[in-house]
Image (cartoon, rainbow, N blue to C red):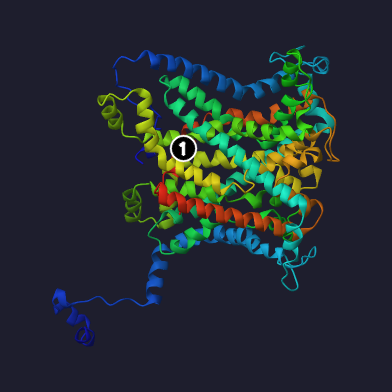
Amino acid sequence: MSSIDNSTPEIHVHNPKNKIKESTGYKVFTVFNTIIMILVSFATLYPFLYLVSQSFSSEQAIIAGHTSLIPEGFNINTYIYVITRYDCEFLKYYLNTVIYTVVGTVLSLLFSSVLAYPLSKTKLRINKFLSPFIIFTMYFGGGLIANYVLILKLGLKNSMWGFILPMLISTYYVILMRSFFMSIPKDLEEAGEIDGLNKFGVFWNIAIPLSKPIIATMTLFYAVMYWNNWFNAKLYLQDKAKWPVAYFLQTIIRGAGASDPDATQMSANIKSCAMVLTVLPIICVYPVIQKYYVQGMMLGGVKE
Amino acid sequence: MSNNTKFRSKENMATESRDEWIPETPSLAKRFYKDIKINGLLYVMVIIPVAYFILFRYVPMFGNILAFRKYSAGRSIFGEGPLTLKYFKQFMSAKPFWQAFSNTLILNGLYLLFRFPLTLIFALLINEIRNLHWKKFVQTVSYLPHFISMVIVCGMIKELLSTQGPINDLIFKLGGEKISFISLAEWFRAIFVTSGIWQSLGWGTILYLAAMTGINPSLYEAATVDGASHFQQVIHVTIPCILPTIATLLILDIGGLVGSGGAFEKVFLLYNPMTYETSDIVSTYVYRMGVESGSINFATAVGLFEGLINLVLLTCANLVSRKVAKTSLW
């Protein structure tokens, strides 16, 4: 991997220099392909646009069965209502999510990288045992109940740590990071050692600064993981004041016909509005880091 | 050698000719000491993560012993008393378990059957886009659902499929009768598979596209010279070149056939007692039995059974792939 210096490998078209006249068959195919891509893009975006439209529509329009992509009776009252109801309840959940995401992501990044770096040193003797020890957990684990019992036993119920710790280090992400660290040229690290850095100094001052793409990727992946998680909250956070917003959403979406006692009947525009607000940060962030995570996934996919 | 060691001293060493000198193998303790001295900091770095893996991954793994020993709330997480197969026998004769087991296979199987080829075709189609901006746009858009919380995905599904939602609206306008999709067992599989494809189609192409970037352009040139049409190039160059990637992804998928993977959250969020006959899967069954009803031992036994089958499946798939496609996970 020569593109340590941030140059993204563009996924390029094959035979771009081939100027031989395209057959009519191929031209027809191109048109056909473009139509497919438009359809797929639209189908992907449709549910989001629908939510946005619902969230800006008026209560009456919703009750009357408004389903188009253009908001009817445009207003932002729903947003004001969702944010301010019950003493700004929504904002509290939102703030919880932000705290869990920031704390969790920082810790996850730290511990994943200090594990992945030594794992990337194939000559390190301990890796004969350490690599299988770590990788095995990808294929077999304790399962839901054993984990649940453990967290209860550790007294982490109703604590932020009960939410964060079960997903602190993802084996898969450690493997992705390891693949990236492996691609760092050895000469640079050796130069660092000659300059008097110890192993940790090499890791911190040389490997980490060279690993911006994978750090960006991991930041995104871990942050999304914490941001989206609701199940740990369902299992371990009974205290409503500690709920993350994703779990709050789950309780309001379950709605009619569910056996959930927390189910509250809410109209579609309120649910849509809460969903839009929750998903917004992700939509804003993920395209920005795209070139990094595409590269990160590629490296991870390449067999060592 | 014996001669050599007898006379070994600093003065002697210097005068000995090179081919006579054989380095002494350092003792294990010495090697260990030297290794610590050089790499000690690397070992220090892994201490906390390794402790984490022991506590949060391996302790629960051994906690599976609860499938064989009685657990009482608040007591040892490894259970107490003699080992027994009681819990295994219990779930083996439980009808809901077999229903959940077959649903898991059916749902995962159907999902794999549709998603796998569709993802591959979508990747091939993206690879044919010439306009780089358009290509980037399509990719960015298609990755989006991957990052969305399952809560929101399922919230969307419920909104879209509700009796007042756009799909029912369309059916109504076309003269059909409104369908209450979410509460009908016969619709669950279709909803599960379709929404799964919606969510994973774009993301699934990343590794394929990466593999396609790695194909040597001269292969295409050679094919063109040989008179291969565009379509023939795809069949005879692109696909053979990405075969290892296809195999690797297929192994992972087959290994996950019995596992819950991402299915648990979705099923949990979409199912309800009315649709259990098609929607209940092993992991949701485990959740209901273990967490909601408190039958910890019973649920652990079910979960362990699922985990073991999964491991066996993965190992077999890996073996086959090593033989056939010459790639394997380990």
> Which SS class for mark 1?
helix
How many numbered dots are placed on residues in this image? 1
Q: Position of residue B166 (x, y in %)?
A: 72, 19
- Name the quarter where the C terminus of chain B is drawn: bottom left
Residue in the image at 43% along x and 47% along y? A179
- Is residue A6 shown to the viewer in this render? no
**Within-10-Å neighbours for mark 1: few <14, some 14–19, many 20+:** many
Q: Position of residue B276 (x, y in %)?
A: 77, 42
Residue in the image at 68% along x and 46% along y? B102
* Pointer 1 chain: B
Asked if residue B144 is positioned above or below residue A42 in the image, the reply reads: below
- Left or right: B4 as drawn, with respect to A216: left
- Left or right: A199 as drawn, with respect to B253: left
Choose top left, top right, bottom left or bottom right for residue A241. Answer: top right
Q: Position of residue A101 (x, y in %)?
A: 64, 41
Q: Which residue is mark 1?
A: B207
- Left or right: B130 as drawn, with respect to A219: left
Q: Nearer the viewer, residue B43 or B100?
A: B100
Asked if residue B301 is positioned above or below residue B270 in the image, the reply reads: below
- Is residue B115 shown to the viewer in this render? yes
Q: Position of residue A52 (x, y in %)?
A: 69, 21
Amino acid marked by disc 1: Leu
Q: Nearer the viewer, residue A115 or B327?
A: B327
- Name the quarter where the N terminus of chain B is drawn: bottom left
Q: Nearer the viewer, residue A276 or A35?
A: A35
Asked if residue B293 is positioned above or below residue B158 in the image, the reply reads: below
Choose top left, top right, bottom left or bottom right for residue B51. Answer: bottom right
Q: Nearer the viewer, residue B260 or B151?
A: B260
